[in-house]
Amino acid sequence: MKKENSLIFYDEVQKRLKKIIKTQHKKIKKIAKLFFETYKKEGMIYIFGTGHSHMMAEEGHFRAGGFAPICPILSPDLMLHESATLSSTIERTEKISTKLLSKYNISSNDILMIYSNSGVNQSPVEAAIYGKEISSTVISVVSCEYSNVAPLSKIGKKLTEISDYYIDNCGPIGDALVEIKNQHKVCAFSTISGSFILNSILSEVANLAKDEEPFPFYISANIPNAKNNNNLLFEKYKKRNPHL
């Protein structure tokens, strides 16, 4: 009897998340330390992604259990809610990400974290180059398997070749996990893996920051005493995060 597709998807997700822990855990702990060190020297962690990868920027932004020094890099042109086809074109257009990132006050004191499943498109690669030019620490999250076969942009480099550090999201070529009639695959993995990687990093950061006052993580507004903690963080970071 053929296994149900939902269970195939579950098994694939479980297998690949375990692979992330097995192969990327040391990098996750190293990057968590960099996050904490950046926080201690009053720096910020800026997160950038185009298309569906922009959700990882929002994943880190002002949410319950979220790290307060995270600032998302957001532009409707590089998201999908206004025009998916236009967004796909723009993310392959020269100078778009450079213009966008220059609007944020990113410095050598900060981290620029870039999500790109294929790791080759113009905008994320250009963003990494921009980050290196301003001497910020550049971290990327990509599917190494996909990046090894995807066609390069005009820049001619992969994100992993430019970044100071990178994490493999252990996703397959093309992102989707469940095969249908030996012809098509459905159910993308990169959002699950991206969120898992970011929150794995943040879990380690929280342990390093457990004695900090205020605790630099937002608390759900429905939890008693959350308001005091969150207001302190909001006041501290509102001038550096234009999306607060």
Image (tube, rainbow, N blue to C red):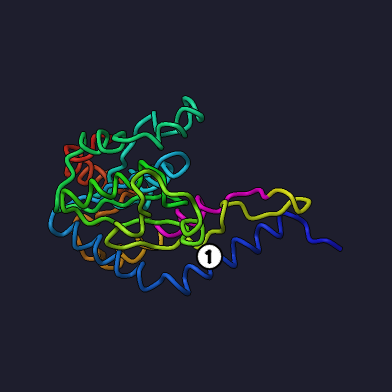
Label 1 crowding class (10 Å Cα cut-off): few <14, some 14-19, many 20+?
A: some
With respect to residue 22, does 176 lie above or below? Answer: above
Residue 50 at x, y percent in the picture: 41, 40
Quadrant location, the N terminus = bottom right
Q: Left or right: where does residue 171 sit relative to residue 222?
A: right
Residue 49 at x, y percent in the picture: 38, 44
Range shown magenta: 185-198
On the image, which quarter does residue 48 sit in? top left
Secondary structure category for the residue under label 1? helix
Residue at position x 46%, y 61% in the image: 144
Q: Which residue is mark 1?
A: 17
On the image, which quarter does residue 127 sit in? top left
With respect to residue 160, does 64 lie above or below? Answer: above
For this rendering, which residue is in front, 232 or 116? Answer: 116
Q: Is residue 61 magenta?
A: no
Q: Is residue 194 visible?
A: yes
Residue at position x 42%, y 60% in the image: 197
Q: Is residue 195 magenta?
A: yes
Quadrant location, the C terminus = top left
The three-letter amino acid code for the residue at tag 1 is: Leu
